[in-house]
Image (spheres, helix red, strand yellow):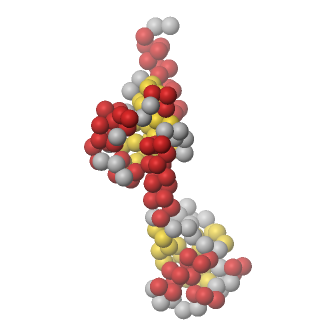
Amino acid sequence: MNYDQILGKAEDLQEEIVSGCILTNAEELGLHPRCGELWVCPEFIATNRRGELDYYGGFEYIEDQYVIQIWGLTVYSKEASRVSELLQVYTEKERMKSTKVIVHQYVKMEYEIEVVGEVNKESVAKSMEEVGYPDASKMETEKTWYFDQSNCRVPL
């Protein structure tokens, strides 16, 4: 195997590793912006800017057993407490982002509202009441639907 073949395999492996991740900026995890963009998934956080993440993100204290370096990509396991804490912060932030919801009630009425957190009958009713829509507490599950971000009709 020559150098170019090794490089090709390393690049392929990097691509495979990050393909199932969400690319986000460090601030979404509560880190300093100089940490740059990070790939986040449930099992790890990855970066191609290890120096910045180590220095500005406090990752230099993560034990070597939880770090894998593959060419220019560094992968930090969720088994490290620092990574686990940041993944929890990110997950909670994502969960609390507001969702635009269009509620079709009793087939004839349509309301557009924003729901913060999980979308369910109670959160939609609360959001509707907050903006003054009538009959929010009388929603009937079998007749009430909302359209999620992918425009799929979903029952409450």
Residue 19, percent across and down? Answer: 51, 38
Looking at the picture, tell me which residue is in the foreground, 102 or 60: 60
Disc tally is 0
As drawn, the residue found furthest toward the left would be: 34
As drawn, the residue found furthest toward the right would be: 142
Q: Residue at x 45, y 25 (%)?
A: 70
Residue 141 seen = yes
Residue 92, percent across and down? Answer: 48, 59
Decide: is 107 above or below 152: below
Decide: is 6 above or below 98: above
Q: Residue at x 51, y 68 (%)?
A: 117
Decide: is 80 above or below 33: above
50 sits to left or right of 130: left
Residue 75 seen = no
Residue 26, percent across and down? Answer: 36, 47
Q: Residue at x 47, y 74 (%)?
A: 114
Looking at the picture, tell me which residue is in the foreground, 148 or 81: 81
As drawn, the residue found furthest toward the top would be: 1
Which image quadrant: the C terminus? bottom right
Decide: is 122 above or below 42: below
Residue 107, percent across and down? Answer: 64, 84
Q: Residue at x 41, y 23 (%)?
A: 71
Looking at the picture, tell me which residue is in the foreground, 76 or 117: 76
